[in-house]
Image (tube, rainbow, N blue to C red):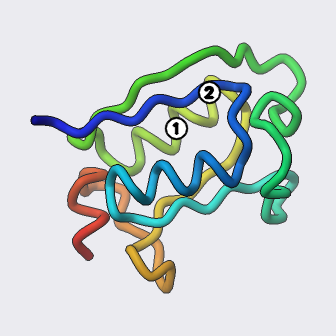
Amino acid sequence: MAKEFKIDGRMKVRTLKAQFKATFGASLRVYKNKHFADDEATLAAIRDEGAKGGALTVGGNIKVGSFEQKIKELYGIEVQVANADDTKLSNNSITLAAAGKE
């Protein structure tokens, strides 16, 4: 069965990162104004002015670069996918499922 990950603007940053890790095995870095976002903030609270927000379902077959761009477009939030132990950023051309195996 394909892994899916659901994102909603009401999620806290901590929850987003934990569920991303549990689903794909990779780490997710979330930024607000070029700094790490507060883990207790909701996505709606840190999104850019004018970002539409809403819900998003992501599968493991989406490329890292496409995922990062979708989050930027929908929420106005910068994110970066990193390997499982969060020591290096994942290549934008691999899938989210592959990022968890780096």
Residue at image position (37%, 57%) is 92
Which corner quadrant of the image does residue 59 belong to? top left
Q: Look at the image and tell me in which quarter the N terminus lies.
A: top left
Label 2 near label 1: C-beta < 8 Å?
A: yes
Q: Residue 3: horizontal and vertical position, in percent?
A: 24, 39
Task: Tell me the CA gap for discs 1 and 2.
Answer: 6 Å
User: What residue appears at the point 41 percent right and 24 percent down from the top-left corner?
Assistant: 57
Number of marks in the image?
2
Local SS, label 2: helix
- Residue 79: horizontal and vertical position, in percent? 61, 52
Residue farthest left in this picture: 1
Above or below for 25 versus 4: below
Residue sitting nearer the eye, 32 or 2: 2
Quadrant assignment for the C terminus: bottom left
Q: Position of 13 compared to 67: left or right?
A: right
Question: Does residue 87 appear left or right of residue 72 in this picture?
Answer: left
* Residue denoted by label 1: 69
> Would you place residue 15 above or below residue 85 in this image?
above
In what element is the residue under mark 1?
helix
Residue at 57% in and 55% down: 17
Identify residue type, mark 1: Gln
Left or right: residue 7 versus residue 6 is right
Where residue 2 appears, as percent x and y from the top left, is 15, 36
Q: Position of residue 65 (x, y in %)?
A: 41, 48
Q: Which mark is residue 73?
A: 2
